[in-house]
Protein backbone atom coordinates (compact mmCIF):
# COMPACT_ATOMS: atom_id res chain seq x y z
CA UNK A 1 0.00 0.00 0.00
CA UNK A 2 1.20 3.49 -0.79
CA UNK A 3 0.18 6.35 1.49
CA UNK A 4 0.20 10.02 0.56
CA UNK A 5 -0.42 12.23 3.58
CA UNK A 6 -0.53 15.99 3.90
CA UNK A 7 -1.82 18.59 6.31
CA UNK A 8 -4.11 21.48 5.47
CA UNK A 9 -2.60 24.90 5.88
CA UNK A 10 -3.66 26.87 8.96
CA UNK A 11 -5.71 29.45 7.01
CA UNK A 12 -7.88 26.76 5.43
CA UNK A 13 -8.33 25.01 8.78
CA UNK A 14 -9.56 28.26 10.35
CA UNK A 15 -12.02 28.88 7.52
CA UNK A 16 -13.43 25.36 7.70
CA UNK A 17 -14.25 25.68 11.42
CA UNK A 18 -17.12 28.05 10.62
CA UNK A 19 -18.77 25.93 7.93
CA UNK A 20 -21.24 23.09 8.54
CA UNK A 21 -19.33 19.81 9.09
CA UNK A 22 -21.45 17.89 6.56
CA UNK A 23 -20.69 20.44 3.84
CA UNK A 24 -16.99 20.27 4.64
CA UNK A 25 -17.07 16.46 4.51
CA UNK A 26 -18.87 16.42 1.15
CA UNK A 27 -16.43 18.93 -0.31
CA UNK A 28 -13.46 17.00 1.07
CA UNK A 29 -14.62 13.70 -0.41
CA UNK A 30 -15.41 15.28 -3.78
CA UNK A 31 -12.00 16.93 -3.81
CA UNK A 32 -10.18 13.72 -2.90
CA UNK A 33 -11.99 11.76 -5.61
CA UNK A 34 -11.27 14.43 -8.23
CA UNK A 35 -7.59 14.71 -7.34
CA UNK A 36 -7.20 10.91 -7.23
CA UNK A 37 -8.29 10.41 -10.83
CA UNK A 38 -4.81 11.16 -12.29
CA UNK A 39 -3.27 8.69 -9.80
CA UNK A 40 -5.76 6.02 -10.86
CA UNK A 41 -5.12 6.73 -14.52
CA UNK A 42 -1.35 6.45 -13.99
CA UNK A 43 -1.74 3.23 -11.99
CA UNK A 44 -3.72 1.68 -14.81
CA UNK A 45 -1.24 2.78 -17.45
CA UNK A 46 1.80 1.69 -15.41
CA UNK A 47 0.38 -1.70 -14.39
CA UNK A 48 1.99 -4.58 -16.28
CA UNK A 49 0.22 -5.33 -19.55
CA UNK A 50 -0.31 -8.99 -18.71
CA UNK A 51 -2.53 -8.03 -15.76
CA UNK A 52 -5.69 -6.78 -17.50
CA UNK A 53 -7.96 -8.02 -14.69
CA UNK A 54 -5.85 -6.15 -12.14
CA UNK A 55 -5.98 -2.94 -14.19
CA UNK A 56 -9.75 -3.25 -14.60
CA UNK A 57 -10.29 -3.59 -10.84
CA UNK A 58 -8.23 -0.58 -9.72
CA UNK A 59 -10.59 2.02 -8.25
CA UNK A 60 -10.98 5.04 -5.97
CA UNK A 61 -12.54 4.87 -2.51
CA UNK A 62 -12.79 7.89 -0.18
CA UNK A 63 -14.29 8.25 3.30
CA UNK A 64 -14.22 10.38 6.43
CA UNK A 65 -13.02 8.69 9.63
CA UNK A 66 -16.10 8.25 11.83
CA UNK A 67 -14.25 8.54 15.13
CA UNK A 68 -12.24 11.63 14.30
CA UNK A 69 -13.84 13.83 11.64
CA UNK A 70 -10.52 15.57 11.02
CA UNK A 71 -9.18 12.64 9.00
CA UNK A 72 -10.19 11.96 5.40
CA UNK A 73 -8.90 8.85 3.68
CA UNK A 74 -8.71 8.09 -0.02
CA UNK A 75 -7.62 4.71 -1.37
CA UNK A 76 -6.57 4.37 -4.98
CA UNK A 77 -6.00 0.80 -6.06
CA UNK A 78 -7.44 -2.44 -4.74
CA UNK A 79 -9.33 -1.17 -1.74
CA UNK A 80 -12.69 -2.90 -2.02
CA UNK A 81 -13.36 -5.73 0.40
CA UNK A 82 -15.03 -7.78 -2.32
CA UNK A 83 -11.87 -8.23 -4.39
CA UNK A 84 -10.81 -11.87 -4.41
CA UNK A 85 -7.71 -12.80 -2.45
CA UNK A 86 -5.86 -13.99 -5.56
CA UNK A 87 -6.23 -10.55 -7.14
CA UNK A 88 -4.90 -8.75 -4.07
CA UNK A 89 -2.00 -11.22 -3.91
CA UNK A 90 -1.24 -10.64 -7.58
CA UNK A 91 -1.31 -6.86 -7.08
CA UNK A 92 1.13 -7.12 -4.18
CA UNK A 93 3.38 -9.43 -6.20
CA UNK A 94 3.41 -6.97 -9.11
CA UNK A 95 4.21 -4.02 -6.83
CA UNK A 96 6.73 -5.57 -4.43
CA UNK A 97 7.84 -8.75 -6.19
CA UNK A 98 8.12 -12.29 -4.85
CA UNK A 99 10.13 -15.43 -5.63
CA UNK A 100 8.76 -15.67 -9.19
CA UNK A 101 8.12 -12.02 -10.13
CA UNK A 102 10.44 -9.03 -10.06
CA UNK A 103 8.92 -5.89 -8.49
CA UNK A 104 7.22 -3.45 -10.88
CA UNK A 105 6.41 -0.43 -8.75
CA UNK A 106 3.33 0.84 -10.55
CA UNK A 107 1.44 1.99 -7.40
CA UNK A 108 4.33 3.86 -5.80
CA UNK A 109 5.37 5.40 -9.10
CA UNK A 110 1.83 6.67 -9.80
CA UNK A 111 1.60 8.18 -6.30
CA UNK A 112 5.01 9.83 -6.61
CA UNK A 113 4.22 11.32 -10.01
CA UNK A 114 1.03 12.93 -8.71
CA UNK A 115 1.96 13.88 -5.14
CA UNK A 116 3.05 17.50 -5.72
CA UNK A 117 0.17 18.60 -7.96
CA UNK A 118 -2.33 17.00 -5.59
CA UNK A 119 -0.94 18.89 -2.62
CA UNK A 120 -0.90 22.24 -4.45
CA UNK A 121 -4.38 21.85 -5.92
CA UNK A 122 -6.20 20.53 -2.85
CA UNK A 123 -7.15 23.86 -1.29
CA UNK A 124 -8.14 25.31 -4.67
CA UNK A 125 -10.57 22.45 -5.44
CA UNK A 126 -11.78 22.37 -1.84
CA UNK A 127 -12.77 26.03 -2.03
CA UNK A 128 -14.61 25.46 -5.33
CA UNK A 129 -16.58 22.53 -3.95
CA UNK A 130 -17.40 24.38 -0.73
CA UNK A 131 -18.62 27.43 -2.65
CA UNK A 132 -20.97 25.24 -4.69
CA UNK A 133 -22.30 23.41 -1.63
CA UNK A 134 -22.78 26.57 0.43
CA UNK A 135 -24.64 28.21 -2.48
CA UNK A 136 -27.02 25.22 -2.69
CA UNK A 137 -27.86 25.21 1.03
Image (tube, helix red, strand yellow):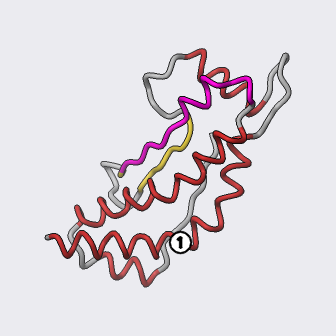
Q: Is residue 65 left or right of residue 136?
A: right
Is 30 one of the magenta-colored residues? no
Residue occupied by mark 1: 121
Q: Is residue 101 left or right of residue 65?
A: right
Residue range of the region highlighted in magenta in the rendering: 49-63
Q: Nearer the viewer, residue 111 or 99?
A: 111
Q: Is residue 46 left or right of residue 74?
A: right
List x then y, in percent, for residue 41.
Answer: 60, 47
Q: Residue furthest bottom?
A: 11
Is 53 one of the magenta-colored residues? yes
Q: Is residue 30 above or below residue 59?
A: below
Q: Few, some or many C-alpha atoms within 10 Å of disc 1 (few <14, some 14-19, many ≥20)?
A: few
List x then y, in percent, for residue 4.
Answer: 60, 55
Q: Element under label 1?
A: helix
Q: Residue furthest left?
A: 137
Q: Is residue 51 left or right of residue 99?
A: left
Q: Residue at x 46, y 76 (%)?
A: 124
Q: Is residue 2 above or below residue 32?
A: above
Q: Residue at x 58, y 46 (%)?
A: 40
Q: Nearer the viewer, residue 48 or 9?
A: 48
List x then y, in percent, for residue 132.
Answer: 27, 72
Quadrant (top left/top right/bottom left/bottom right) for the N terminus: top right
List x then y, in percent, for residue 125.
Answer: 43, 71
Q: Nearer the viewer, residue 66 or 93?
A: 93
Q: Residue at x 50, y 34 (%)?
A: 79
- Total marks placed: 1
Amino acid sequence: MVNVTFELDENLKKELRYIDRNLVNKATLATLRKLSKPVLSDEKSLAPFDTQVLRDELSISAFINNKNHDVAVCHVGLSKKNHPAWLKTRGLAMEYGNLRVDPRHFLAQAADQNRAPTYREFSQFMNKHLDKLVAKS
